[in-house]
Amino acid sequence: GESVGLHLPTLSVQEGDNSIINCAYSNSASDYFIWYKQESGKGPQFIIDIRSNMDKRQGQRVTVLLNKTVKHLSLQIAATQPGDSAVYFCAEILGSGNQFYFGTGTSLTVIP
Amino acid sequence: GAVVSQHPSRVICKSGTSVKIECRSLDFQATTMFWYRQFPKQSLMLMATSNEGSKATYEQGVEKDKFLINHASLTLSTLTVTSAHPEDSSFYICSASDAREDEQFFGPGTRLTVL
């Protein structure tokens, strides 16, 4: 079918290296942010979230950084593994939560 | 918890037929469900938002008569692609949120191919 919209930016990293995936959001009033991972042919899966009153949150091998001054969000993956190869989306959530805005997404490829 | 299922996972149909895709929240009550469309190597595109018992809110450019959405219960929403054409071939993903509305739980997606 006809394709519309932007194609995903790509990032390739060597296995074992750290990955940093960036996302710019648009609304300074957004108060909640989520990173999703989407493997090929599957729906997005929740990875980690962060509230606007925080600037950093750590999970298992993942860290999310929030810079509200420049409206920027990043996802850091430590010791990237082949299983991390996927598309990663950030989402900004406004107000009640029904206003979800997804970033373009980044396609991460891990080279063994 | 917070599992969302979609059925079917893959469907192939002839041009002109209608296809119904189901989205179910298995272990929570989904006050709001969302339908997305995704082309290969592209981002999610929100098609519509539906609240249980009310009409869906469609995004600009999405034909409501083409993509019929029904959210009859707190655990089920359906998307019917009417008179499907090859350009409707895509990956359709639903998501659901509960009363807290601070997270969307995604279904596994449905791959539609229209011949």
Image: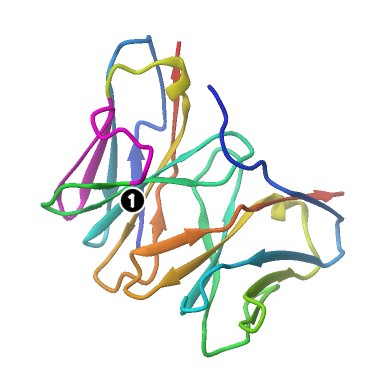
* In front of the other: A86 or B46: B46
The chain ID associated with circle 1 is: B
Q: Which residue is drawn at 68% across and 45% down?
A: A8
x then y, percent, for residue A51:
50, 82
- Amino acid type of the residue tagged 1 in the rendering: Phe
Q: How many labels does the image show?
A: 1
The residue that mark 1 highlights is B34
Please report the residue visible at 51 percent of the width from the left and 52 percent of the height from the top. A44
Left or right: B85 in relation to B19? right
Q: In this view, does A36 lie to the left or right of A94?
A: right
* In magenta stretch: residue B32: no
Q: Is residue B112 in view?
A: yes
Seen from the viewer's position, the closer of residues B51 and A109 is B51
Q: What stretch is highlighted in magenta?
A: B59-81
For label 1, the SS is strand
Report which quarter residue A67 is drawn in: bottom right
The picture quadrant where one finds residue B40 is top right
Where is residue B91? Give x, y as percent. 48, 34
**Residue B108 place in picture, x, y as percent:** 44, 44
The percent coordinates of residue B78 (x first, y second) are 24, 38
Tell me which residue sits at (37%, 44%) in the image: B60
Judge whether residue B1 can be spotted in this image: no
Colour convention of the picture: rainbow
